[in-house]
Image (cartoon, rainbow, N blue to C red):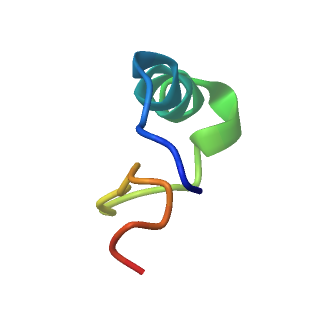
Amino acid sequence: LARVGAPEDVANAVLFLASPMSNWITGTALVVDGGGLA
């Protein structure tokens, strides 16, 4: 995405995983790197 990641980027992922919206997600590694490993 042509920018360095910010703490908010990781925080948003953590908030999503802690929310009811992620109740069907199990056993995954969520990479928060802006597509750097793609």
Residue at 40%, 58% (x, y): give it.
26
Pick out the residue farthest to the right: 21
- Residue 21 lies in quadrant: top right
Residue 27 screen position, x and y as percent: 30, 62
Q: Is residue 1 above or below residue 37?
A: above
Q: Is residue 14 left or right of residue 2?
A: left
Residue at 46%, 20% (x, y): give it.
11
Residue 9 screen position, x and y as percent: 51, 30
Q: Is residue 15 above or below residue 13?
A: above
Residue at 66%, 29% (x, y): give it.
20
Q: How many numbered dots are placed on residues in this image?
A: 0
Query: 27 or 9, which lies in front?
Result: 9
Q: Is residue 16 above or below residue 24?
A: above
Pick out the residue farthest to the front: 2
Q: Quadrant of the C terminus?
A: bottom left
Residue at 49%, 24% (x, y): give it.
18
Query: 1 or 20, which lies in front?
Result: 1
Residue 32 screen position, x and y as percent: 40, 49
- Residue 37 lies in quadrant: bottom left
Query: 4 or 19, which lies in front?
Result: 4
Q: Is residue 33 left or right of residue 20?
A: left
Q: Quadrant of the N terminus?
A: bottom right
Q: Is residue 22 above or below residue 12?
A: below
Residue 6 screen position, x and y as percent: 44, 25
Q: Is residue 2 left or right of residue 37?
A: right
